[in-house]
Image (cartoon, rainbow, N blue to C red):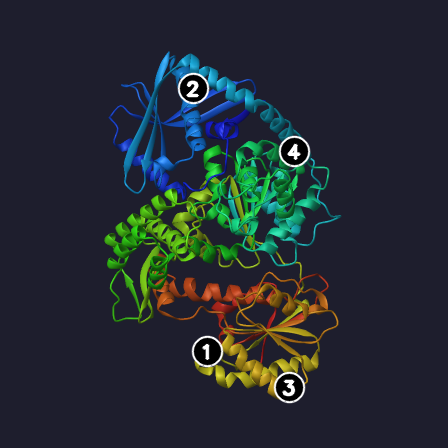
Amino acid sequence: MSYVVAVRALCEFTAKQGDLDLRFTPSPTALEGMAGHAVVTGRRGATYQTEVSLSGEHGPLLVRGRADGYDPDQNLLEEIKTFRGDLASMPDNHRHLHWAQVRVYGHLLCQKLGLDQVHLALVYFDIGRQSETVLRELASAQTLAALFTGLCERFVAWAEQELAHRLARDAALAALQFPHPAFRPGQRDLAETIFKASSSGRCVMAQAPTGIGKTVGTLFPVLKAAPQHKIDKVFYLAAKTPGRKLALDAARSLTGDAVPLRVLELVARDKACEHPDKACHGDACPLAKGFYDRLPHARSAAAAAGMLDRAALRCVALAHEVCPYYLGSEMAKWSDLIVGDYNYYFDLGALLYGLTLANQWKITVLVDEAHNLVNRARQMYSAELDRLALRAARAGSPKLVQTALDKVARNWPAAGSAAYEVLPAPPEKLLAALQGASATITDYLSDNPAPMDPALQRFYFDAMHFARLAELFGEHSLFDASMVDPKNTRLCIRNILPAPFLKPRFALSHSTALFSATLSPWNYYGDALGLPDNSAWVDIASPFAAEQLTVHIVERISTRFQHRASSAAPIARLIAAQYDAMPGNYLAFFSSFDYLEQVAAQFAQQFPGISTWHQPRRMNEAQRDDFLGRFTLESRGIGFAVLGGAFGEGIDLPGARLIGAFIATLGLPQMNPVNEQIRQRMQTIFGQGYDYTYLYPGIQKVVQAAGRVIRTENDRGVVYLIDDRFAQDDVQALLPRWWQVTRSAP
């Protein structure tokens, strides 16, 4: 059995040495890198060959990759590297790695074409200046063969270990047993759906009720299918920390000590950093000093650990005096199940997407609570620039940088008379000024590696993100300007349709399963996310009986903005009447904090004997825990919350902890100039502007909030949907099939 390794992976494993050093960053994005490669190769002659596929064997190793370019007329093989900043500031270990790559490609080319020697070139392409720096050498086939053999010999022991690990892993997964005595109702259907999607290599959207065990019900079939379908990695992507924790717990229950599965939790850099006051290079941070020299032992220890959640990864990293965050990035290459946030695969510069492309992995992707992906992806592909932030950045800058930022200020679009306006596209002069300012700041950082002024750093990263998205600007996004106050305007590239950005992510995956309790209607999510045309959609039958949940539509109350003041007292009486009939814990959801406070004040005035607690406008983690802590088996009272906030989804209050919910809103997004622009664009593209912008996202939040009430097969509860519009047929069609809805008066 051969062990397949990419040229880049082989060289990174064997040729990297010295300190971790991020002073020569930020690097271009993958998209910018591809564009830079295209510019360079476009300058070459007619006989120039691009993306030259090469491979060679050494013992159990099959080394393969694509050389960037080969000119047969000059017998010249080129490796193209894009960069930003001052090339002279590139750390030596980066240059050493790049030469190792081009020399390996040189050996493979000599072997393929029977060459005695070959000219090799490193072409460094400056993204900002669009200029090339070329470093060349002439190498003999004999010299290159010796280098290739040396690198392979240093890697082969690890490769043999990896082959043994994969064989043991696949054998154990093929025999994997479900960890519980029986499937929950609906859970088997979900697992079978996911397994079939993996077998056919398709994308599937699975709408599955809360409480059936979706995490285990999706992880089990993809792990069971992995050996049969030759899956290299499984990515479990969650919107929030609780989703990651559930996935890690499920992995533990599935594998225990019997399955040698390497599980990795990816954590954001700011949460994993041990020295947030220090810069990421060897002169400042002790965990960056000699990072690549200590990495081999740390990597071996991490691979042997099996379960690398945040705490375990940190323990291994500190034991070997390396950075936990960058050890985690390294272990993404060697782990079987990787648990992390959406952004690790779907973002513009996503780590897992980049590694999958580079290593040609065959992957399965699981997307937890996938209804969140639309808004999260819109945020990933949106960018803002604030005039006030520009001024703050200038105030903390050296003279050279101030001059570059002044040019940005001069090319800032003039504020119009409107508080909000949509412009055709980001102005070219502004983009040129931003590119120049980013290059100037990068050069300055290369020469002055001390920590950057926080305001300058924020604007620097925002400006680069803005410029990158401007290059990709199209029908999927808006460019708008908002008047924050008379002295401040905000420019925004606002993504409204993430589909064009996400399509390549879905196409790269062998199979993708998106699951949630609210994925209706399927065409909305398919269109918004850019799912493949052959994607399947299934609605898993609920394990709950209609008699477990009494659902009332209160159609004599309107919660429209103009009726909210007059509705406060009737809603308060409705809540109190239900409480008197069945004392216990309830959640009452409202469309805004103002509305919440109006009704809560009425309730407190009319019914002071009933205990209440409110979601604050700005809430820290301790306040969130305190709010949830009021819902106990013995407590009684009403919790007031905002729909779509921290308590509308992702919380678990089974049994008597929560016996009912009042939802005094359709959850429709606010009608404002931004949403109206989104509605118009959705109408133009899909012909369903109102539904895609307002109705579907609103009802999704309502169903999620109502789903807090029934969590187990033994739960009983009540939900009140308060608004006359809930009685409309098109709204009721979006409610769960298993609900039996009755209409009642306040």
With 200 as the anchor, is 680 left or right in this view?
left
Residue 607 is labelled as 3
Give how far apart the Cα atoms at labels 3 and 4 are: 61 Å
Q: Nearer the viewer, mark 2 or mark 3?
A: 2
The type of residue carrying mark 3 is Phe
To which residue does mark 1 refer? 560
Residue 2 seen anywhere in this rendered image of the structure: no
| Quadrant in which the N terminus appears | top right
Q: Amino acid at mark 2?
A: Leu
Give the position of the C terminus as an image quadrant: bottom right
Nearer mark to the viewer, of 1 and 4: 4
The x and y percentages for residue 707 are 61, 64
Q: Residue at x 72, y 73 (%)?
A: 635
Residue at point 30% right, 50% down?
400
**Relative vertical location of residue 463 with respect to residue 64 in this rendering, above or below:** below
Residue 235 lies, in percent from the top left, at 55, 43
Q: How many other residues sit within 10 Å of disc 1, few (<14), some (14-19) or many (≥20)?
A: some
- In primary-sequence order, the first of circles 1 and 3 is 1
Mark toward the start of the polypeptide (2 vs 1): 2
Q: Which residue is mark 2?
A: 108
* Residue type, mark 1 in image: Arg
